[in-house]
Image: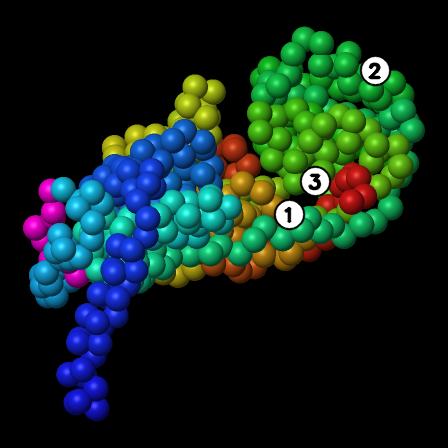
Amino acid sequence: MRTMLRKAPRRLSSLDRKLVRAVSNLPGGSHDDFFRRLSAAATKGKLWFGIAGVMALVPGKTRQAALHGVIAQGLASAVTNLVFKTLLPRTRPLPEHLPVFRFVNPQPTSSSMPSGHSASAVAFALGVGLVRPSLGAALAPVAAGVAYSRVHTGAHWPSDVAFGSAIGAGAALVTRRWWPVWPPVPETRRNAVRAAELPDGQGLSIGVNTLGGSYAAETADALQKVFPKAYIQKIGHEEDVAARIAGVATRPGTAALGVWGGDGTVGAAAAAAVEHSLPLLVLPGGTLNHFARDAGTPTLEAALRAADRGEAALADIGHVRVERGLPDSPERLELTMLNTASVGLYPNLVRRREQLQPALGKPLAGVVAMFRTFAAGTPTTLIVNGVRHRLWILYIGRGRYYPRDHAPLVRPVLADGVLDLRMITADEPFARLRLLWAVLTGTVGTSGITHLSETDRITVEPGNGPMVLAVDGEVMPGVRRVEFTVRRDALTYYSPLL
């Protein structure tokens, strides 16, 4: 074994010289200038930073892939230059090993082992590919060209390039700690049932909140044209939305309840529909139309098609018990949660993101909103299921939301029997710095300060005085205790068959 170890460096050196001689025997041509320019472009990461800058102009996964590639490249470069080049000193190829017209000038003075260019090239291409495989495949030939160029121009021995490439691959794979492979969003699945058929809106009573996000003066007339036989009740300013919707639900001849409005209005309609055993038709009348989107009725055409055919499905709803007010005489409320609830800075984050979104787009608006919210905000002390936490955000979704990180967007299954609990805590050391770093790098979902779990019952109590609770966008101050449970298959809603 010792003899083999002593011979290994000599054998490696012999193999390197054979490969370099093979490269030196290649005929000269325009490719010499190409590889020289390619090698120079990749010096100090200029090539990869340029590509990352172009990718960053495209929001979504492409931008995230660029960030992932740059961080993987930075890690590979640091390990190569600060660690291995110090531990493994080696002389670079000499001018006599390659034709002079091909030799890099000036020759680098650092250790030849390993190749920093190769490490950075492979790290960036693989880092991008872990997020966007198609882009990684497109960059792979460029990375291979950069790695080969270091041998072609006499800057490195082939084994330097091989070792540097291995370091780059390792750096990219290590960053999976920050960018794990999230489970894919499952296919939409609904518990289909039959509901009353509503041709032309016959038997449909619709409550329209005039304060809804997309309401306009012509909204009611437009709805009447789509559902000519429906009864439409407008709910004006300062009217009790829940009471007015309950009146619509109990109107004689009502076979189904329709609703046009934001999340709070839809939640009130869902409670009335469950109470009076009516199917619910959710129309896209809010700013974001969360439930309409999840229910498959994001457009009036889809809602009309489902209502005409009586196509419906079952959904779970959240049951929320709230205690608020004075400790000696608390007010007790029971609410229906259709989408989400939150405590802490999340409502401020959402408000800022929605304000910035028209100008910046959703991804960048989310990052800016996170920075503004958490840079100035303070954590809240809460007792969640009996455990005390200092929290930036407590978020509860009725149902499993995707993606599985800090920014849930879609809910493909509305009857899964779970509450989606997400906490961003401030219990850890340097919590604010860790949070801001996670926001900057897009890794909040995988940070140690983010905790994701699922359950069917959650209790929340304030640690220091009453808290502010938001349920389906409706803000409620002075809350002293809240309990969330799930009512399985409680709501029948219209939904086109998949």
> Residue 68: in sight, yes or no?
no
Residue in the picture at 56% in, 59% down:
456
Which residue lies under the disc numbered 3? Answer: 295
Which residue lies under the disc numbered 1? Answer: 412
Q: Give the quadrant of residue 16.
A: bottom left
Closest to the observer, 386 or 154: 154
Q: Dot 1: few (<14), some (14–19), or many (≥20) neighbours within 10 Å?
A: many
Q: Position of residue 64 (x, y in %)?
A: 40, 41
Closest to the observer, 161 or 344: 161
Real-space CA distance between mark 1 and mark 3, rounded to the nearest whole angstrom: 9 Å
Q: Going from the N terminus, do you reach mark 1 or mark 3 first?
A: 3
Closest to the observer, 179 or 471: 179
Mark 2 vs mark 1: give the one in front.
1
Q: Position of residue 7 (x, y in %)?
A: 18, 82
The amino acid type, in three-letter code, at marker 3 is Ala
Residue 110 located within the stretch drawn in magenta? yes
Which residue lies under the disc numbered 2? Answer: 225
Which residue reaches farthest top?
217
Image check: 27 left or right of 153? right
Element marked by disc 3: helix
**Magenta residue span:** 106-113
> Residue 15: in sight, yes or no?
yes
Q: Dot 3: few (<14), some (14–19), or many (≥20) neighbours within 10 Å?
A: many
The amino acid type, in three-letter code, at marker 2 is Lys
Residue 377 located within the stretch drawn in magenta? no
| Relative height, residue 191 to residue 386 (above, below) | above
